[in-house]
Amino acid sequence: MGFSIIETYFDAIILIQADVYEDERGIFMESYHHEAFRALGIEEDFVQENHSISALGVIRGMHFQWDKPMGKLLRVTSGRAHVKEIDIRKNSPTLGQSMHVELSASKPYLLWVPPGFANGFMSMEHGTEMIYKCSALYNPSAESGIAWNDPALALEWPVHEINTEPILSIKDTQAHTLAEWLQRPESSAFMA
């Protein structure tokens, strides 16, 4: 059993492929192994695991938590998700830049997103299931988000591929722009 790094983004986010074993019964894979992840440079101890199921066109994000800063190890177990990350680390040379990757049940990829990034995804299929391990317990008084449609960031979402309008929570429609977030004192929790 093993894991390999496929790509690294912003010298922090890591796309990981797990070894998959397949035979006439189906497939088997390890989705997490403490020592193997340490060997990849991921030193986190995960303290919480979350599971979301999303309808086609749902956008969840762009979320982050500053106290305690939360990193996330993401994987899709059913369906397909367009995952997007925004660098919100003050003094980072890539502050405000974003990246995206597709995670799906058909590929054994995991995405490690350390603290300092706003995380979100769009469900590209009905019933997309995202499971993610968290490096900190959820703290609703210390969470926030960046607007999925912040005009200064010009984030591209593949809405044309799904032929439906995005579906968002009320909280996500009221998220800050990156410029607004950077004016808040809490933004100092994430430094490059």
Image (cartoon, grey):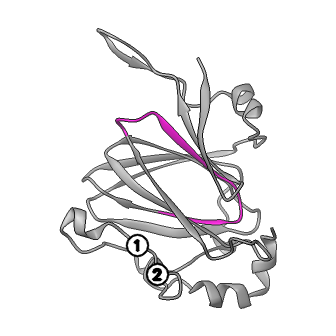
Does the magenta-highlighted stretch encompass residue 156? no
At x 64% / y 89%, what residue is drawn? Answer: 179
**What mark, if any, has residue 102 been given in the picture?**
none
Q: Quadrant of the C terminus?
A: bottom right
- Dot 2 crowding, Cα within 10 Å, few <14, some 14–19, many 20+: few
The quadrant where residue 42 appears: top right
Give the image location of residue 15, x and y in percent: 57, 44
At x 77% / y 62%, what residue is drawn? Answer: 68
Q: Quadrant of the N terminus?
A: top right
**What mark, if any, has residue 156 been given in the picture?**
1
Residue extending farthest to the top is: 24
At x 53% / y 41%, what residue is drawn? Answer: 110
- Dot 1 crowding, Cα within 10 Å, few <14, some 14–19, many 20+: few
The residue under label 2 is 154
Q: Which residues are magenta?
A: 105-120
Give the image location of residue 153, x and y in percent: 52, 81
Locate residue 185 relative to residue 102 in the image: left or right.
right
Q: Amino acid at mark 2?
A: Ala
Dot 1: element: loop
Dot 2: element: loop
Distance in Å between CA atoms under marks 1 and 2: 6 Å
Q: In the picture shown, does residue 75 fall above or below 53?
A: above
Locate residue 130 relative to residue 112 in the image: left or right.
left
Give the image location of residue 123, x and y in percent: 34, 58
Look at the numbered discs 1 and 2 and tell me whether their residues touch, using CB distance below 8 Å: yes
Q: Amino acid at mark 1?
A: Glu
